């Protein structure tokens, strides 16, 4: 600290001898705050440090109010309110809830496939899928989409269909039937 009366630099003995935003530690003025040495205007003294509670992730809006780290995005603090930063690719904040972050997986989620609210349709004898943000479906075991028409799903029961026994286009010969996806004598 400077002693202006004697024009010399001297070691501090107490916080009040240091400027705003500084405290006396080991006889030196260092960044910090206390009751005797408050923070400069626009800053708040939180745990001995001067912080901007309008933007601090550890002290957002008030001392000790930490912003939770959301899933799939960085936390933000703007005007003293916690929020969610830009979502990582393939993630989205569909419910606008900062506490759970970018909760939707738009790359693989069947309820938000490619974008929030895009629900993959259900198909007959199939399970809806989402891959790389595009809807699709997977046939249930024993069924197939032999006509390649997604509208009617997996329309063929490979276990019992005479014209598609075990696989599409595998027709049973005369005198045979399809039982459990294999040819069998009538």
Image: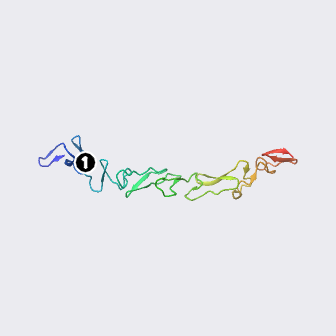
Quarter where residue 28 is shown: top left
142 lies left or right of 45: right
24 lies left or right of 154: left
Extreme residue in the right direction: 175
Residue lying at 25% horizontally and 45% vertically, measured from the top left: 30
Residue lying at 66% horizontally and 56% vertically, measured from the top left: 122
142 lies left or right of 50: right
Q: At which x and y percent is residue 6?
A: 11, 46
Circle 1 crowding by C-alpha within 10 Å: few under 14, some 14–19, many from 20? many
Q: How is the image coloured?
A: rainbow
Secondary structure category for the residue under label 1: strand
Q: At which x and y percent is residue 157?
A: 76, 51
Extreme residue in the left direction: 6
Residue lying at 70% horizontally and 53% vertically, measured from the top left: 125
Q: At which x and y percent is residue 145?
A: 72, 53
The residue identified by callout 1 is 22
Number of marks in the image?
1
170 lies left or right of 97: right
Residue lying at 43% horizontally and 52% vertically, measured from the top left: 75
Q: At which x and y percent is residue 38?
A: 25, 52
Give above or below for 95 relative to 28.
below
């Amino acid at each position: 600290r400077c002693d202006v009366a004697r024009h010399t630099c001297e070691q501090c003995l107490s916080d009040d001898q240091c400027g705003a935003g500084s405290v006396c530690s080991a006889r030196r003025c260092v960044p910090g705050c206390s009751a005797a040495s408050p923070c400069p205007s626009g800053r708040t003294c939180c745990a001995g440090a001067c912080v901007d509670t309008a933007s601090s992730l550890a002290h957002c809006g008030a001392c000790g109010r930490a912003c939770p780290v959301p899933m799939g995005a960085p936390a933000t603090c703007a005007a003293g309110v916690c929020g969610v930063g830009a979502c990582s690719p393939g993630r989205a904040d569909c419910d606008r809830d900062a506490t759970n972050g970018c909760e939707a997986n738009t790359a693989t989620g069947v309820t938000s496939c490619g974008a929030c609210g895009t629900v993959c349709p259900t198909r007959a004898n199939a399970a809806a899928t989402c891959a790389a943000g595009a809807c699709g479906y997977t046939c249930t075991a024993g069924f197939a989409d032999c006509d390649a028409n997604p509208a009617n799903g997996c329309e063929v029961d490979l276990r019992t269909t005479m014209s598609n026994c075990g696989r599409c286009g595998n027709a049973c010969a005369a005198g045979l039937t399809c039982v459990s996806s294999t040819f069998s004598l009538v």
